[in-house]
Image: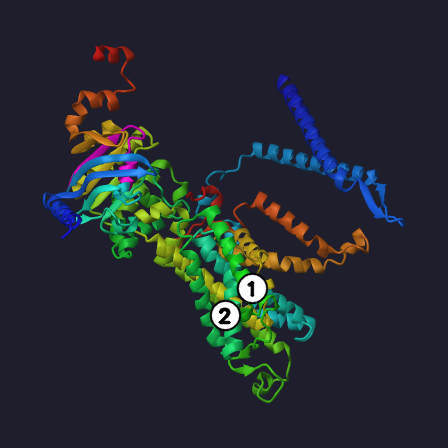
């Protein structure tokens, strides 16, 4: 057997072990490139069953790239991504979705000219709409606003409502893992609170496993069991949400950055 | 007092602005007239060019434009003033409300109305012009329009539903026509056997086109499909052994009534059904044949829109990335759209061949693709009724011009309205793009609804990106 073959075997065993240890999603040593520009370097991230894990970082740190790499576009150049013990590194996006990962994408990406109901049907298309009525009930309970607007065109709704729809649409496929890419983007504080409340409910009540990419570090870390900090495509820090919230470096960089007086920073350095 | 004065000055300023605007229009007209109208060129006896100045005409044109613009602005000003006084009650929420507006009510009635008119056309035409023979013009026109309705509906699957801009649709029309022509002339197969074969062949070519362009969208896709259409045409011209080159294929077997030929003999259609022979029977049959084919296209499209595949097409048009992340295989979704659209193009093509009895590459040039695409876009992408209306306007409209004899009385004997066809066409297109930029019928009805359906005007929703 060739070395490569053994490596594959070893990697497969590892993936199985990760799954056995309750890791639903494991990203190991993943690097991704746009052309020749590295967007992710050797990233290791794990999400266990029933956890909320968040990834925070500045603009351009590679947060969304990691999210999209998990979904197979762009594909990881090195490393391995496993979901429920299965290697998904080289699978096309739609095949990954079929394994039970759903996404509330960055910028929401609802189908603007289709009605809310049709959007939800698109989310349920994996199951051919077998339990559509039941799932519709479920997401409408989570977001009562959507129930009022089932016949409205998605593109005519407010940003907050579209975000709710994006989440609801993702839920319609009954995923085992739900990815959120910046759900708070461009929303009013009150709506952000509502969205984060819904994410918390999903996890606490239904045990949904959630991987959350967010710029709004405070909200995300408060919500999450564990968190990772991404800087220039590398994971520089990880820990429980609480620990990261209290970490002075995280505080300085992502939490109070805009609020801290210039003199304070000088003092802190001195 | 001061208020009244301010109002007066405001109105004065408005008037001055309007005058300036109208003056600008007149100036532009003058600029345009100088190279085109101001001198008339005639060949004199010595074969030199005689220049006759026509500044009077130029002045008249500029004055007319000035006056027209002035009146238009005045009318608009008064309308705006009136609107400012009484704000429209349903401004922003206009199309979201539940009660259908007049347009929607009409479009609800339109389908049965169209269907009735289409079914009755040969009868009405025959009665109105006194016999089948004299009604030939109307029936042939009906066949022509219905062919384009069918082509429009076929392309609507690709462009309107799946959002894949296809500028080479005529290629599938050609594939269908040549498939029938070759099978019928070489192997003597009947039309009814060839029809599905032609559809299959066209669908196959649709898939072949689909594979290389899977990753393309928008402008890039348009260019590649345009090239594809031209390639097919050039192959048809140059593969002389198979297709007869630009001479085309002639003496293609004519349509039969399910095996009974439309001839005067004892085994002909007329004799079999105890009618007196009339050459027009074939045309009437062709008319109902294309009507049936078009209705099948429509029925299949409407049905598919309610099925997962149809919804996947529409979702693909809206947002391809979101589609993929919902587990939809965009590759098969695109290929089925191309294949199905092409299949209906192929059906229409074989109908064209059986109707004409002669085909050549000339019939499948880019202009045809452009007309079919214009029908889809004018009709409002994705709207079946809109496409039918647009096909009638685009194909029937030019025919209307033939009958505008009274214009000769206005513009003199030498005036031929047919020569102004393309000009009028261009004007109509520009007007459409100004007033109805999303097509005649831009309201999209959801394919599913719990209680009642509400259409929402396309104007209120941004276009899908990507």
For residue A56: magenta?
A: yes
| Residue plotted at (25% across, 44% down) | A141
For residue B273: magenta?
A: no
Provide the residue span drawn in magenta. Answer: A50-68
Residue pushed farthest right?
B45
From the viewer's perspective, tell me whether residue A134 is left or right of residue B440.
left
Mark 2 crowd level (few <14, some 14–19, many ≥20, 10 Å Cα): many
Residue A182 visible within the image: no
Q: Position of residue B243 (x, y in %)?
A: 55, 69
Q: Which residue is mark 1?
A: B238
Residue B448: mark in rendering: none
Mark 1 crowd level (few <14, some 14–19, many ≥20, 10 Å Cα): some
Q: Which residue is mark 2?
A: B179
| Badge 2 and badge 1 in a common chain | yes
Q: Secondary structure at mark 1?
A: helix
Residue pushed farthest bottom?
B266
The quadrant of the picture occupied by the C terminus of chain A is top left
> Is B4 located above or below residue B308 in the figure?
above
Q: Quadrant of residue A249?
A: top left
């Amino acid at each position: 057997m060739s070395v490569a073959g053994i490596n594959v075997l070893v990697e497969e065993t590892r993936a199985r072990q990760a799954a056995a240890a309750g890791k639903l999603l494991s990203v190991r040593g993943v690097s991704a490139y746009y052309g020749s520009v590295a967007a992710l370097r050797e990233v290791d991230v794990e999400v266990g069953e029933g956890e909320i894990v968040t990834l925070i970082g500045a603009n351009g740190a590679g947060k969304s790239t990691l999210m999209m790499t998990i979904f197979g576009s762009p594909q990881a150049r090195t490393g391995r991504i496993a979901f429920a013990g299965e290697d998904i590194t080289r699978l096309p996006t739609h095949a990954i979705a079929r394994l039970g990962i759903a996404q509330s994408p960055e910028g929401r990406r609802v189908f603007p000219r289709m009605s809310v109901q049709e959007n939800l049907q698109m989310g349920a298309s994996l199951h051919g709409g077998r339990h559509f009525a039941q799932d519709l009930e479920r997401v409408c309970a989570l977001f009562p606003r959507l129930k009022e607007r089932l016949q409205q065109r998605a593109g005519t709704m407010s940003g907050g409502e579209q975000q709710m729809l994006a989440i609801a649409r993702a839920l319609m496929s009954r995923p085992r893992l739900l990815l959120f890419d910046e759900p708070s983007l461009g929303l009013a504080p009150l709506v952000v609170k509502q969205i984060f409340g819904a994410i918390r409910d999903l996890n606490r009540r239904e045990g949904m496993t959630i991987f959350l990419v967010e710029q709004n570090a405070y909200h995300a870390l408060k919500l999450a069991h564990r968190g990772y900090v991404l800087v220039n495509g590398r994971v520089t820090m990880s820990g429980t949400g609480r620990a990261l919230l209290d970490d002075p470096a995280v505080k300085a960089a992502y939490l109070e950055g805009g609020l801290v007086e210039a003199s304070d920073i000088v003092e802190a350095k001195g | 007092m001061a208020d009244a004065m301010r109002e007066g000055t405001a109105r004065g300023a408005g008037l001055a602005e309007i005058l300036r605007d109208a003056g600008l229009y007149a100036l532009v007209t003058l600029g345009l007239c100088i190279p085109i109208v101001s001198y008339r060129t005639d060949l004199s006896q010595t074969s030199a060019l005689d220049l006759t100045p026509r500044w009077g005409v130029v002045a008249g044109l500029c004055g007319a434009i000035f006056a027209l613009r002035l009146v238009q602005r005045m009318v608009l000003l008064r309308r705006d003033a009136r609107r400012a006084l009484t704000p429209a009650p349903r401004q922003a929420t206009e199309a979201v409300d539940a009660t259908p507006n007049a347009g929607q009510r009409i479009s609800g009635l339109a389908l049965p109305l169209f269907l009735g008119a289409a079914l009755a056309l040969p009868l009405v035409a025959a009665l109105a012009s006194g016999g089948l023979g004299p009604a030939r013009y109307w029936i042939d026109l009906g066949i022509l329009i219905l062919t384009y309705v069918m082509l429009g509906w076929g392309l609507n699957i690709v462009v309107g539903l799946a959002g894949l801009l296809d500028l080479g649709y005529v290629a599938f029309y050609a594939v269908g026509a040549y498939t029938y022509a070759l099978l019928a002339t070489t192997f003597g197969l009947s039309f009814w056997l060839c029809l599905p074969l032609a559809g299959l062949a066209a669908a196959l070519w649709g898939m072949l086109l689909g594979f290389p362009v899977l990753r393309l969208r928008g402008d890039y896709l348009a260019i590649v499909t345009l090239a594809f259409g031209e390639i097919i045409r050039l192959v048809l011209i140059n593969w002389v052994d198979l297709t007869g080159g630009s001479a085309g294929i002639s003496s293609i077997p004519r349509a039969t009534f399910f095996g009974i030929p439309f001839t005067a003999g004892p085994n002909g259609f007329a004799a079999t059904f105890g009618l007196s022979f009339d050459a027009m029977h074939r045309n009437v049959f062709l008319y109902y044949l294309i009507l049936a084919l078009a209705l099948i296209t429509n029925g299949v499209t409407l049905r598919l829109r309610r099925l997962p595949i149809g919804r996947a097409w529409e979702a693909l048009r809206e947002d391809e990335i979101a589609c993929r992340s919902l587990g939809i295989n965009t590759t098969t979704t695109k290929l089925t759209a191309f294949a199905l659209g092409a299949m209906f193009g192929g059906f229409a093509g074989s109908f064209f061949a059986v109707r004409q009895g002669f085909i050549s590459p000339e019939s499948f040039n880019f202009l045809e693709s452009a007309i079919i695409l214009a029908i889809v876009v004018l009709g409002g992408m994705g709207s079946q009724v809109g496409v039918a209306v647009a096909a009638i306007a685009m194909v029937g409209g030019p025919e209307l011009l033939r009958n505008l004899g009274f214009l000769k009385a206005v513009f003199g004997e030498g005036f031929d309205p047919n020569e102004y066809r393309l000009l009028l066409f261009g004007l109509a297109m520009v007007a459409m793009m100004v007033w109805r930029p999303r097509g005649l019928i831009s309201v999209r009805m959801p394919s599913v609804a719990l209680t009642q359906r509400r259409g929402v005007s396309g104007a209120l929703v941004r276009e899908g990106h990507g």
